[in-house]
Image (cartoon, rainbow, N blue to C red):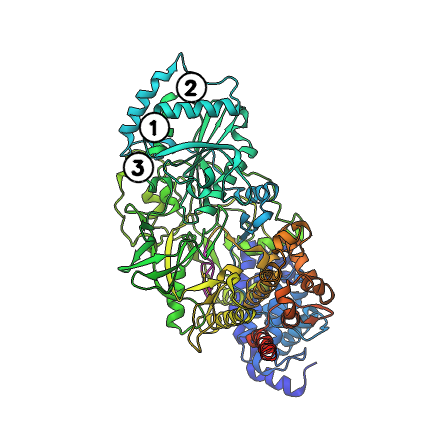
Amino acid sequence: MATTSELDTIHANQINEGLGAFRRLFESTRAGLGIGESQDTVQVVLSTVATAVAKNLVLDLILALQNQPIARTLPSQRGRANLLEDLFTLGSSVYSNDFDIKSAIPLVEQVVNNAPGEGICSAVSDLVAHASPKPITPPTALEKAVFDTPLRSSSASQRGIEQTHDEVDQRILEELTGRVFYDVEGFYERYFEEKTWSNKAGDICEKSMAQYADGRWSGWPVPSLEGPFLEWLMKFQDTVLSGFGRRYYTSANKVLRGSEADRKLDIFLTPADTPLPDGEHDWSNVLVIGEHKQNPDEDRSTKTLVQLAGYAREVFGSQPERRFVPGFTICGSMMRLWIFDRSGPYNSEKFDIHKEPERYVKVLAGYAIMSDAELGLNTLIKRDGNGKYIVTRGVRISLEDKPIASTKAIVCRGTTCYRGRRSDSTEWEYVVKFAWPSDKRQREGELLKLAKERGVTGIAVWFNHEQITIDGDPDTISHFRRDMKFGTPRKLSSKASWVDGSPESSRAYSKTSLRGRSGSGATHLMGLGIGVSSATTSSSGQKRKRDERLDGGSRLKRSKSNGSHASGTNVRIKESELDAIGVHSIQETVVDSLADCRNQWRRNNVDSIQEAGADSLTDCESETYGNRVHYCLVTSPAGRPLHEYQSVRELLEALRDAIRGHRSLLEDGKILHRDISENNIIITELPAKEAPKGRLIDLDLAKELDSMPSGARHRTGTMQFMAIEVLEGKGHTYRHDLESFFYVFIWMCIRHGYEGTGRQKVNKLMRPKTNILRGWYTGTYTEIANTKQGHVVKNRFENVIAEFSPKFENLKPLARELRSALFPIRDGDIFTGTFHDHDIMYDGMIMAFNAAIGRLGKEEQSIA
């Protein structure tokens, strides 16, 4: 019951006058439903409309009440600062599954019936009391979360001897599901017709006809067993395809060098003059991959696809700057042509080698005489007697022979980083990065420039970034796939194994999708009031907004060598449709001031309003394939990978300073990184006295705090470093990145630190199936989240740090301090949420690192 003082405040503020807009909105809703006025009007309206609409009405009323001056002066009924805080909490509860819409009926009735102010305030107090759970511990404020693109697994987590066929093949299957296109119309024409070498291929074809008679190739083995077929192919090559500088080989019975998964390769094309150490071929020289099967029925089998995809993965791993990988399968006498690019594989319609002999020869000859660019090599990287180099901003930058970071997967950003230096210098001063981000994401170079302008410290410093062009053409997936007709992608499995089938899991994952509550094409983006318009869709089915960054608003000249000639009457995908669609694919749908206010509230309270929808990880998507853009970014200073630390102290200082850089990026730059991993932290070479000893790199997945969702289909993350709540599908905050730093530290202490100890490396010392860290990247997202949550519980955490390598034994106290800073106990359980106050967790982690570095200094002094 209100006190005399409170009643005086209520009477003085005339709360009713500020609620007229809501009454008009409610009346409009009632009239639209055709519901007559009665004593039960509010109850009838709220029970008739959809639950989401009813909750929107209640939230509109709460927001209108928040805007009343009285909300700031009346005291809270729940021990908070004032009524305004009660209303904020009430608004946060409206979209929870526990909120009972019937409990809001008395308040709505008071407002609709224009009741006195004390009646409205009393109803507000009653609703707050009803909706508020009994507090066991003081409430924890959640930081505003950044809207996330759905996570997607890749095969990149499999490393070293973990790359067994069973382990890798399952991850490949998961990586490719929904991204494989069979029988793409126009494939052969796109890659093998109207080329600069077409006449030469035609000459070879005529020459080969001497071996073709009676509708069959002479000497073709029947049945087409592997050994006899490969022998026939090599003889055919010697007769028809000799003298082109490239040659087909077979390694069906011998593992190629450079393969950690011990893969053999039936057929492959490689330069004929490549040196062969010990007579063995290497994956780093493979240009085209081929798979032979005796049975023609295996043409469309999943096993055949996964085998060929395994070869493509090895090529991308050994040639990290590779743009795409061509391939083919020959099953019986049926041949099918393939391309693997960073958005997935697609293939031609199959054809019978005996019935279409000219096509068969032109394919084999075409691969042998194509340009390097047509085979998917990155010709931006030049080579001379001094090694590899690029030219950017008029500066020649020499590249180190081996990358300091790369990703071994097919469908991914393909991030590859080299150290670079000017031609007149002996010091590595740059990091040169090649990557394939989604065309919908803000460019990393633009974010780095923005961070530089805002005074961010402790991260990579921008030097230059540019979209790569090859032979005058934009290097994009849409350009690769132009002039072809794609159908429906093949779904390899009904449910990928990383997705938990439970209702709770599906709900969690659907939160990140922002696909809304409807399965229709007009998707509603939850929390932003944004709808996807009926944008013009190319024949690929790809919906895109215009990206001026893609080609600067003008088409680049296309070279004949890349097969750019297309019929003007062709109704298939046109380059102009893919790279220059001028349709804005999203539009803001703010109806009135109340809706605008509601949208703003949702932006500030995103975690509490996300609802279950379709499973975003495996459902059908609106795009036929995701377009990616090939970019080159140059930053400074140069650095070493984290695993190349030269002392324990250097490792700790690098991690600490990377955390400081993350803090500056967040607080000064207003940018959240969202992809903390072992590969995204570098140790700075010879830093100045006060300069950071470690820096944060790779802002490909970073987002400005107030930016809209990018619209990218998926983001692949490094499983072992993902935070628990991110795996559960919750919005990404700074806390989750700090948790990822913690996992990087633990990972380093277990996976490294055996050098110089006389003991074997971890991958030889431990069996992978008993390694405690395997649970951080194998299984469903829910299983991984549960494993990590179990590991950070105090008692079980001791089992984790018990696996620290000898070099890091003395860092167990630091591990415990970091765990305590990140996972304090709340309500008898560990806390995995986010504090509004950044300082709590940043200071806790940085102080823990400083204390450990100080202890190391004392130990070094005592030893000296």
Picture disc at residue 242: 1
Asked if residue 704 lies in the magenta stretch, the reply is yes
Q: Quadrant of residue 363?
A: top left
Q: How far across and how far down the image is residue 30, in percent? A: 56, 58
How busy is the neighbourhood of tag 3: few (under 14 within 10 Å), some, or many (20 plus)?
Answer: some
Q: Quadrant of residue 111?
A: bottom right
Residue highlighted by disc 3: 563
The amino acid type, in three-letter code, at marker 2 is: His
Picture disc at residue 354: 2
Q: Observer-nearest residue: 634 or 557? A: 634
Picture disc at residue 508: none
Mark 1 residue element: loop
The amino acid type, in three-letter code, at marker 1 is: Ser
Q: Is the residue under label 2 in contact with that under label 1 (CB below 8 Å)?
A: no
Q: Is the residue under label 1 in contact with that under label 3 (CB below 8 Å)?
A: no
Q: How far across and how far down the image is residue 400, in percent? A: 39, 56
Q: Label 1 vs label 2: CA separation?
A: 22 Å
How busy is the neighbourhood of tag 1: few (under 14 within 10 Å), some, or many (20 plus)?
Answer: some
Which callout, 2 or 3, points at the residue further toward the start of the chain? 2
The amino acid type, in three-letter code, at marker 3 is: Gly
Does residue 710 lie above or below 141 as drawn?
above
Question: Depth-wise, is mark 3 or mark 1 nearer the camera?
Answer: 1
Q: Is the residue under label 3 in contact with that under label 2 (CB below 8 Å)?
A: no
Q: Quadrant of the C terminus?
A: bottom right
Q: Quadrant of residue 558?
A: top left
State which region is magenta.
700-711
How busy is the neighbourhood of tag 2: few (under 14 within 10 Å), some, or many (20 plus)?
Answer: some
User: Which residue is drawn at the image coordinates 37% and 17% (left, top)?
Assistant: 211
Q: Is residue 688 found left or right of 603 in the rendered image?
A: left
Which callout, 1 or 2, points at the residue further toward the start of the chain? 1
